[in-house]
Image (spheres, rainbow, N blue to C red):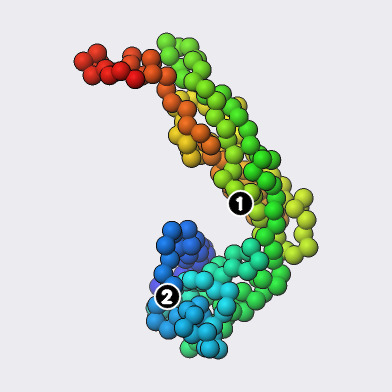
């Protein structure tokens, strides 16, 4: 079937997300690209298609898409993902290398903020008998320093940061739970960073008792 621009964009985004998921995996095999694997497998270091910064990816082929390749590479703290389609012969390797060369030559990962810049502590409450009861406080922060990929030479101040941080939280909180966001914007493009709970806040034991039938109550 013929794909419109919107459908093609969805296919590219889906391939990019799958590559991100692969990168986030705790264990990644050394030989990630099936078949020849010439762009990133060390065994093929002497291949004309070997790209030393490439870490992993996946080849593919369909009659409609031709030879395809999704790959990610890292250099100087910058991670790039390249997706190529409609390639003939070994073009999926050469086109990918050309994309990486362009990306690394023209873009850099710029630090926008430190974790401490967007760390806040807010109260946690629960409603009991129509009254707000304090459970404690939770610290909210990004999981790591915040970076944004920008054209080389662009200052971090060019990125607009919009915060969505609650003034308080209702109910128990799990450590690692997303409680807010940072929305980074540059040149019409946005990137969202989660603000997560750095500690857990549980229901008070006395109030847990009130929710459990007497026959099932146990000491704290």
Looking at this view, name the residue that lies furthest to the left: 215
Q: Is residue 11 visible?
A: no
Q: Is residue 89 visible?
A: yes
Residue 204 x/y as whole percent: 42, 19
Q: Is residue 214 above or below residue 145?
A: above
Residue 90 x/y as whole percent: 50, 87
Residue 104 placement: quadrant: bottom right
Dots 1, 2 in contact, CB < 8 A: no
Q: Which residue is mark 2?
A: 31
Horizontally, is 116 left or right of 8 in the view?
right
- Tell which of 141 and 187 is nearer to you: 141
**Which image quadrant: the N terminus?**
bottom left
* Disc 1 residue crowd, few under 14, some 14–19, many 20+, Cα 10 Å: few
- Tell which of 83 and 172 is nearer to you: 172
Residue 61 x/y as whole percent: 41, 79
* Disc 2 residue crowd, few under 14, some 14–19, many 20+, Cα 10 Å: some
Residue at (33% x, 16% y) in the render: 209
Residue at (61% x, 75% y) in the render: 99
Q: Is residue 113 above or below residue 48?
A: above
Residue 162 x/y as whole percent: 67, 41
- Mark closer to the chain start, 1 or 2: 2
Secondary element type, mark 2: loop
- Tell which of 15 and 212 is nearer to you: 212
Residue at (75% x, 53% y) in the render: 156
Please tell me whether mark 1 or mark 2 is closer to you in this view: 2
The label shown at residue 29 is: none
Alpha carbon distance from label 1 to label 2: 31 Å
Q: Which residue is mark 1?
A: 191
**Which image quadrant: the C terminus?**
top left
Residue at (63% x, 64% y) in the render: 78
């Amino acid at each position: 079937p013929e794909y419109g621009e919107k459908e093609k964009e969805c296919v590219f985004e889906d391939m990019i997300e799958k590559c991100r998921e692969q990168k986030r995996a705790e264990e990644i095999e050394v030989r990630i690209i099936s078949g020849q694997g010439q762009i990133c497998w060390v065994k093929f270091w002497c291949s004309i298609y070997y790209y030393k910064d490439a870490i992993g990816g996946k080849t593919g082929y369909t009659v409609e898409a031709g030879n395809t390749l999704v790959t990610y590479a890292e250099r100087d703290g910058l991670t790039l993902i390249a997706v190529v389609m409609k390639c003939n012969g070994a073009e999926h390797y050469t086109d990918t290398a050309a994309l990486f060369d362009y990306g690394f030559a023209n873009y850099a990962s710029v630090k926008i903020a430190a974790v401490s810049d967007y760390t806040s502590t807010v109260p946690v409450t629960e409603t009991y008998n129509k009254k707000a009861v304090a459970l404690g406080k939770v610290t909210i922060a990004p999981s790591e320093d915040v970076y944004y990929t920008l054209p080389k030479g662009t200052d971090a101040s060019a990125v607009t940061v919009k915060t969505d941080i609650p003034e308080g939280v209702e109910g128990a909180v799990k450590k690692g739970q997303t409680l807010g966001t940072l929305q980074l914007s540059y040149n019409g493009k946005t990137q969202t960073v989660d603000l997560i709970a750095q500690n857990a806040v549980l229901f008070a034991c006395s109030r847990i008792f009130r929710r459990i039938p007497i026959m099932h109550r146990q000491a704290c």
